[in-house]
Amino acid sequence: MLNNFQEFYNVIPLLLIGAGILISLIIEIYFKESESILPWFTILLFILAGFHSIFNVNSVSIVFQNMLATGGNVSVFYFIFTIGAAIVALLSIDYLKKYGAYFGEYYILLQTSVLGMMLMAGAKDLFIIFLGLELMSVSFYALAGLNRKKLKANEAALKYFLLGAFATGFIVYGIALIYGTVQSTSIDMISSRFLELIPNKLFDAGILLFLIGFSFKIAAFPFHMWVPDVYEGSPTTIAGLFSTGGKAAAFSAIIISLDVIFSGRIVNYFSPYLSVLAVFSMIFGSIVAISQDNIKRMLAYSSIAHAGYMLIGLASGNSSGVAGVVFYLTAYTFMNLAAFGVVALIEGKDEANLSLKSYSGLASRNPVLAALLAIVMFSLAGIPPFAGFFGKYYVFMAAIKSNLTWLAIVGVISSVISVYFYLRVVVLMYFKDTETELSIEKSNTGLVAVIISVALIIIIGVAPGSIINLISSFL
């Protein structure tokens, strides 16, 4: 229970989103103008929760009978989820009309998914992680198939649901084995007894199944098979949310639940497994992305490679690696949201203008969008001084500190490969003549969302030290 006002104050972000879901339901049921009210109400809700979290980042506490943590890096994750979702909501205002699928439940599902992400990030018990995961996942399945008239959307929702449920089975079985050996689902209890339990093969199997289940959620190779089809078939703004908020929530759950093996306090017994996942995710994602003609599929394979870079931080098994992963997730959220935001603005009705050829000559037709997308591509490729460069730098340095220099070298090679398909988009925009007539519907709200994302990419790139110091201070 909440014992005092300070504890109540610390959980306000969760209470805001929870209350917002109920209020949104009432608005959708009783107000005819809900179509114009809900987007702005949702954005306001996310901004209030996000800024409350970041301004109270030092208010570290554990509430609800040691079930939920607040403050510290939990607040950093809350900020990533809420501000990222606010950008998605801003992008969606005009996009949903073009996509032909305005439903009031869109914004309610968006809020519910964010509440699930927040529960995962703040969990101090494996059941809270599972509760948050299901809240987020069920919302995602519905959002993927938002437009029932589109066959690709139906395919995306079905594939996501079937493979997501399969992955959840691994996680639940893993939790069952962990509970069977520890006799508790408390993360603090698991951490305190980790050295004593690690010789137990059932406990090891439980941790491994838990990691395998979340490998699906972060889209790591070879558990990536759902990603390209789901991203391509889902609404573009929602694909952006899957690749950012969903990935960040899954990483937060891994970091929090297995903090003891990522903090450098004991030997990282699972480093070989994580290293193999990292290598295959980076190389596979980067190579296959080269052959893609659809920009959403290209970004999907790119997200598999980025999951690999972040896994380097976890394989390092030290606090520098964890700090690097949290920093990377912060940067990656705004990079990918900006990328999918520009794609959503350029996308035409009936999913037109999604081929890479559609971007030929964009600089002469819409120099603002071309410039914004060029910055995003440079950042995703890891070119300084943008945020993406420092995200990779911090995880590679963590690997070197842990004598995993070979893993950092593979990461650099993968980054070099990825430069080709990112810069290919820039070359098409600036150095190729247009082949087809491209009609871009004006969206002031969508453009503002992309500009905010790009501004955050630049700010994070200009001042990476202050952000990594803030993150590191709570590890």
Image: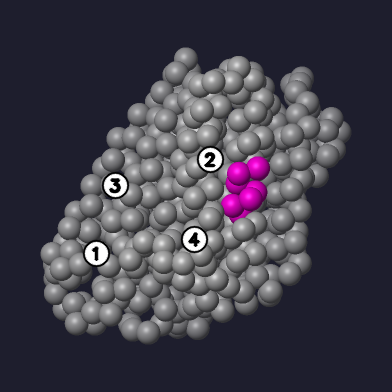
Q: Earlier in the sequence, mark 2 or mark 4?
A: 4
Amino acid of disc 1 = Thr
Secondary element under disc 3, as helix, strand or loop, is helix
The residue under the point 41% across, 23% down is: 154
Magenta span main SS = helix
Nearest the viewer among 373 and 234 is 234
Nearest the viewer among 405 and 329 is 329
Disc 2 from disc 4: Cα separation: 17 Å
Q: Position of residue 427 (x, y in %)?
A: 75, 43
Asked which quadrant contains residue 36, the reply is: top right
Read off the residue under disc 1: 185
Residue stretch rendered in magenta on the structure? 44-50
Read off the residue under disc 4: 8
Is the C-beta separation of discs 2 and 3 under 8 Å? no
**Image vertical order of residue 454 relative to residue 151, above or below:** below
**Image vertical order of residue 276 relative to residue 432, above or below:** below
Q: Is residue 262 left or right of residue 21?
A: left
Q: Residue furthest front?
A: 4
Q: Earlier in the sequence, mark 1 or mark 2?
A: 2
The residue under the point 24% across, 64% down is: 185
Amino acid of disc 3 = Ala
Query: Label for residue 20?
Result: 2
**Image vertical order of residue 297 relative to residue 303, above or below:** above
On-image quarter of the N terminus: bottom left
Number of numbered callouts drawn: 4
Q: Earlier in the sequence, mark 2 or mark 3?
A: 2
The residue under the point 53% across, 32% down is: 24
Nearest the viewer among 322 and 292 is 322
